[in-house]
Image (spheres, grey):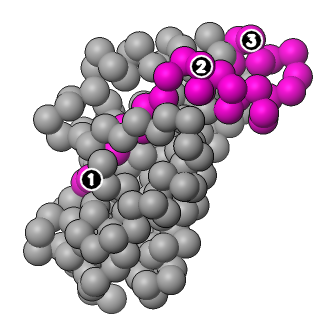
Amino acid sequence: MNQDAGSEVLFIGGRAGVGKSTTALEVSHLLAAAHVEHAVIEGDNLDLAYPEPWRRGLGLAEQNLGAMWANYRRAGYRRLVFTNTVSVVRLDVLTATLGGDVHATAVLLTASDRTARARLATRETGPGLDSHIRRSDDAARMLEAEAPHRFIASLPMGARSPTSRVMSSASPGGLIAEPRHGRFCDRKCPGILEP
């Protein structure tokens, strides 16, 4: 693979409980089935520490992303599926962190408060559920206000699971299509994440 070729990045953002990780894994499975080399990075894990580095003004998430992507690039990868709640409103910072020529596709997954809360309740069983729900609700309002909608495909997840949402959209021509059309895959791939 040409190391000088730019990076193709699919940024998946959205509130907690919307299905970012599940969607990224489904994208990964579909790409793998089409034999498309790629990496998946969960942005929320890049600075998972206490006290939170970002609260102390430390840019560990960006530093770790840059280091990880540099390692993937040296290994020959040029496609990345990246998930993070606010990735779609931080595209400028994130693409600069990745370095080089970055072709970005940003997808904002959305869900109603009720749907997100129900999904969170199935995975957050401890005393932190209430604060997690509050943070998810706050993130949803911020993303609604700040996401640059002219650059982002917004996909409401509804009550359906992210897996069924992605799989039901598996037809040619979705966001993962041929790069000459400004898309993510360099060959005919199953199109996914279509509205």
Q: Give the residue number, with chain letter if any, for mark 1.
A: 105
166 sits left or right of 118 in the view:
left
**Can you tell which mark lies on residue 114?**
2
Which residue is under mark 3? Answer: 130
For the residues carrying marks 2 and 3, which lies nearer the camera in this image? 2
| Amino acid type assigned to the residue bearing label 1 in the image | Thr
Three-letter amino acid code at the position of disc 2:
Arg
- Compute the Cα span from label 3 to label 1: 32 Å
Tell which of 84 and 14 is nearer to you. Answer: 14
Dot 3 surroundings within 10 Å: few (below 14), some, or many (20 or more)? some
In the rendered view, does 11 fall on the left or right side of 2? right
- Sequence-first disc among 1 and 2: 1
Structural crowding at the residue carrying mark 2, measured as other residues with C-alpha within 10 Å and reported as few (<14), some (14–19) or many (≥20): few
x 23%, y 69%: residue = 173
Q: Position of residue 195 (x, y in %)?
A: 30, 48
Q: Earlier in the sequence, mark 3 or mark 1?
A: 1
Up-down relation of residue 169 to residue 51 (above or below): below
Specify the farthest residue to the left: 180
Q: Report if residue 140 lies within the magenta region.
A: no
State the residue at coordinates (28%, 61%). 175
Identity of the residue drawn at 48% across and 73% down:
30
Taking the view exactly as shown, the residue that stands out farthest to the right is: 126
Q: Which residues are magenta?
A: 104-132
**Residue 63, visible in the rendered structure:** no
Say if mark 2 contacts mark 3, CB within 8 Å: no
